[in-house]
Image: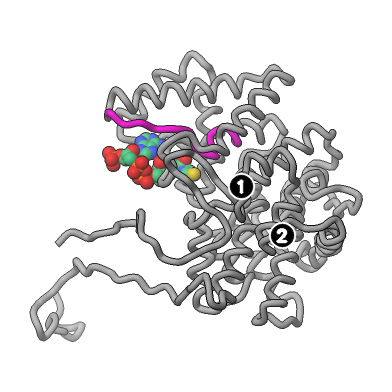
Amino acid sequence: METKNIGLRGIEVADTKISNIDGEKGKLIYRGFDILDLTKNSTFEETAYLLLYDKLPTKQELNEFNGKLVEARYIPKQMQKNMENWRGDADPMDMLQAFVSALAGYYDEEFSSKDASYEKAINLIAKVPTIIASWHRIRNGLEIIDPESSLGHAANFLYMMSGEKPDPEVEKIFDVCLILHADHTFNASTFTARQVASTRAHMYSASSAAIGALSGELHGGANTEVMKMLLEISEINKVDSWIKEKLSQGEKVMGMGHAVYKTYDPRAQVLKELSRKLAAKSGEQWFEMTEKIETATILEMKSQKGKDIYPNVDLYSASIYYMLKIPVDLNTPIFAISRVAGWAAHIIEEKFAEAAPKTALYRPKAVYVGKYCGPQGCEYKTLDLRK
Ligand code: COA
């Protein structure tokens, strides 16, 4: 018997009001709003509010929300001290997962109500950038930089990481990147968060599980792998042969392909233009090289496998972060800085859905293909009788 539904592709598992993908048309909406519209007119903070509260905020609501985020940006000094015990070359995603989980142990708090979950959501959105920036400074033997209340979410992270306040253009580019990564329906990490939340586990627990899922190279880890690929290829004229060889060996090209989009990922379109813009300014080769990878992969996939393939969100974000002087291994943690807003919205929806959307504890069915010795089961032999 062949297992149906491997990887749950195309299987509907729950209702959601948070976001929707039209994989054929290449469209993504958050709470009804086209992400292309949001990237032009919104900010990450406003988009996070929209995802959490299912409405665009009024001026006063946004001010209050921003105020709460600014206040919640600090992390316990003891947590920063604990980071000093970690190996300097530890993966930042492992560190992030551990310290997001640890947040639950730093305060004497209430976890189970809806109000408490919103509070934790704000806390997480505010603290994830500080955890990442603190760790980055510690591992490089640098002074930790406290959050700067006058800066927006995007600019504040860049400042805490590098010690330099970004110019408005860089701030806007990074803010757009955060908007684009904030939610994406039931992707692997969000589904993980929902699955954990469906057991009624709390916000920090479900989010740390999601961080684990995001770290894998077939999901959020792909942007780090894209940059490693660009650095490995290193010269534009080597792209074609490199891609040809990888695909003929049955390997995957990171940043290409998607489980849902059967056309160009709309996020990749925006990111491609941002990468082009940054490269035009800096004169670096990374945009041109990425574009060549896109073209070569499309051509090779067609000729080797007769299949169409398109870039996903990770292809062009890698070069953008590199040109913004962000260390390669922070690419995936940056994804988490943004996606935590989506996770939080989904965790709240999963736990507190009233009449609709309908949710239930996830419990899929497995197809057992292991040993079967008959109706009595396999014969158990004590240790000394086993060979
Ligand atoms: N490089 C080479 N081949 C790829 C590919 C890639 N990036 N993406 C898909 N394919 C191949 C698959 O292996 C599959 O081949 P097969 O039929 O011979 O087994 C075929 O194309 C169809 O794949 P599809 O069903 O469209 O996608 P999927 O759901 O199996 O995989 C991903 C989706 C995201 C896991 C896959 O595209 C991938 O691994 N991409 C690289 C990692 C990445 O960038 N992840 C970030 C996603 S946002």
Instruction: Provide residue 83's location: percent of width, then percent of height.
Output: 72, 60
Q: Is residue 242 left or right of residue 173?
A: left
- Cα distance in 3D space between marks 2 and 1: 13 Å
Q: Nearer the viewer, residue 271 or 242?
A: 271
Q: Is residue 86 left or right of residue 78?
A: left
Instruction: Provide residue 310's location: percent of width, then percent of height.
Output: 44, 32
Is residue 141 visible in the rendered image? The answer is: no
Instruction: Please give the name of the residue rendered at 51% of the width and 42% of the height, measured from the top-left corner.
Output: 222
Q: Which residues are magenta?
A: 306-318
Q: Nearer the viewer, residue 253 or 137?
A: 253
Judged from the image, the secondary structure of the residue bearing numbered disc 1 is helix
Judged from the image, the secondary structure of the residue bearing numbered disc 2 is helix
Instruction: Please give the name of the residue rendered at 63% of the width and 27% of the height, measured from the top-left corner.
Output: 273
Q: Is residue 111 positioned above or below 91 on the image?
A: below
The residue that mark 1 highlights is 181
Instruction: Provide residue 51's location: percent of width, then percent of height.
Output: 65, 58
Q: Is residue 41 positioned above or below 112 on the image?
A: above
Residue type indicated by callout 2: Ile
Q: Nearer the viewer, residue 170 or 233?
A: 170
The verdict on residue 86 being magenta is no
Quadrant for the C terminus, please: bottom left
Instruction: Please give the name of the residue rendered at 30% of the width and 57% of the height, measured from the top-left corner.
Output: 6
Where ligand 1 lies, by quadrant? top left
The residue that mark 2 highlights is 125
Indicate which disc, 2 or 1, sits on the residue closer to the N terminus: 2
Residue type indicated by callout 1: His
Q: Is residue 299 positioned above or below 364 on the image?
A: above
Q: Nearer the viewer, residue 193 or 38?
A: 38
